[in-house]
Image (cartoon, rainbow, N blue to C red):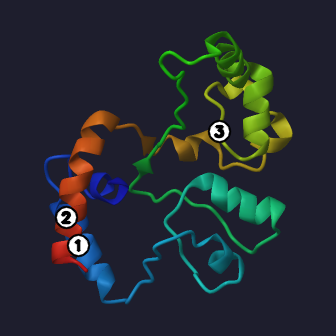
């Protein structure tokens, strides 16, 4: 979906992404069915379309020779989602967990795992220095994630039919 949006597509028009992946297929890309993290660390995979936190973790925790970039055309910002289970037996405790996670302290813990906090003010300065500047993240856009989830199946089916 990020490639499609960056190349001018919409949730109703997948042609830009399908055309891109058809052209990319000429390079015989590796399309793993499971995580590629170890293969990136070893250098086996030179370019990976993935989340920023994996690149930062590889660079700063695992000391891999990697860099995270946001394409000049842009990308999608994909939020982490947490929710309270309906009729949870310990709902009050669960709410405390959610409240802590969203507090500055909780968000700082997530930031130290290279997950961008929902509030920039919660980002510790030493960790912020390891991320790309906010100006780079301005190219990461949100979409209607409900519509995206609905459209994903049609895109996946078309990708498997036309590209793979």
Q: Residue furthest front?
A: 89
Q: CA distance from mark 3 to mark 1?
A: 32 Å
Q: Residues within 10 Å of mark 3 (few under 14, many from 20)?
A: many
* Residue sticking out furthest to the right: 126
What residue sits 50% from the left and 40% below the top? 138
Residue 32, disc:
none
Q: Which residue is mark 2?
A: 157
Report helix, strand or loop for mark 3.
Answer: loop
Q: How would you rate the neighbour count of disc 1 (Cα within 10 Å): few for under 14, some for 14-19, many for 20 or more?
A: few
Which dot, 3 or 2, sits closer to the camera? 2
The residue beneath circle 1 is 160
Apparent side of residue 108 relative to residue 22 in the rendered image (left or right): right
Mark 2 or mark 3, which is nearer the start of the sequence? 3
Q: Residue at x 65, y 50 (%)?
A: 132
Q: Nearer the viewer, mark 3 or mark 1?
A: 1
State the image quarter where residue 106 is shown: top right
Q: Nearer the viewer, residue 87 or 146?
A: 87
Task: State the residue position of label 3.
Answer: 116
Q: Quadrant of residue 28?
A: bottom left
The answer to whether marks 2 and 1 mark residues whose Cβ atoms lie closer than 8 Å is yes
Number of other residues with Cα within 10 Å of mark 2, as a class: few under 14, some 14 to 19, many 20 or more: few
Q: Position of residue 47 (x, y in %)?
A: 54, 76
Query: Residue at left 30%, top 89%?
Result: 26
Asked whether, in this view, residue 58 is left or right of residue 54, the answer is: right
**Secondary structure of the residue carrying numbered label 1:** helix
**Circle 2 SS class:** helix
Q: The C terminus is located in which quarter? A: bottom left
How far is disc 2 from disc 1 in space, using C-alphas? Answer: 5 Å
């Amino acid at each position: 979906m990020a490639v499609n949006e960056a190349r001018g597509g919409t949730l109703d028009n997948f042609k830009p992404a399908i055309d891109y992946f058809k052209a990319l297929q000429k390079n015989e890309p590796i399309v793993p069915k499971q995580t590629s993290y170890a293969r990136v660390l070893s250098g086996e995979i030179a370019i990976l379309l993935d989340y920023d936190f994996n690149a930062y973790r590889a660079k700063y925790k695992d000391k891999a020779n990697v860099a995270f970039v946001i394409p000049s055309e842009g990308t999608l910002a994909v939020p982490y989602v947490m929710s309270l289970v309906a009729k949870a037996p310990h709902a009050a405790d669960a709410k405390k967990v959610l409240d802590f996670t969203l507090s500055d302290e909780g968000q700082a813990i997530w930031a130290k795992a290279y997950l961008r906090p929902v509030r920039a003010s919660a980002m510790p300065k030493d960790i912020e220095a390891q991320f790309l500047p906010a100006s780079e993240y301005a190219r990461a856009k949100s979409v209607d994630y409900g519509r995206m989830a609905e459209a994903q199946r049609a895109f996946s089916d078309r990708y498997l039919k036309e590209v793979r």
